[in-house]
Image (cartoon, rainbow, N blue to C red):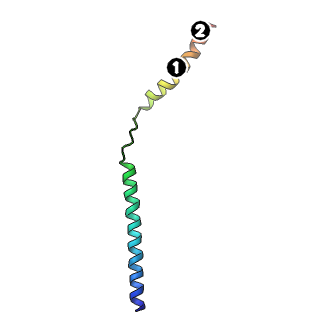
Amino acid sequence: MQGLVLQLTRAGFLMLLWVFIWSVLRILRTDIYAPTGAVMVRRGLALRSTLLPSRQRRHAAAIWW
């Protein structure tokens, strides 16, 4: 009887571990492939749009002085 309880406990624990692994993989998969709506911007274009206007203002101020 004790051997049967031990085997059932081991099988239950193993099943619980597999359910945990399956749920983690499912969550990771949905997070990776979820549509975010974010737009991918190339790094050079993003830097150009944010850094150049400030440089142009400094350059324009230096010309006037």
Q: Position of residue 64 (x, y in %)?
A: 61, 7
Query: Which comes before the other along the chain, label 2 or label 1?
Result: 1
State the SS at label 1. helix
State the SS at label 2. helix
Residue 25 bears which disc, if any? Answer: none
Q: Give the spatial CA distance, label 2 vs label 1.
A: 15 Å
Residue ID at (36%, 53%) = 29
Q: Which residue is mark 2?
A: 63
> Amino acid type of disc 1?
Pro
Q: Residues within 10 Å of mark 1 (few under 14, many from 20)?
A: few
Residue 1, image quadrant:
bottom left
Image-based side of 35 in relation to 55, left or right: left
Vertical order, 56 against 9 (above or below):
above
Look at discs 2 and 1 and give the one toward the viewer.
1
Quadrant where the C terminus sits is top right
Residue ID at (56%, 16%) = 57
Q: Nearer the viewer, residue 6 or 51?
A: 6
Q: Which residue is mark 1?
A: 53
Residue ID at (40%, 56%) = 27
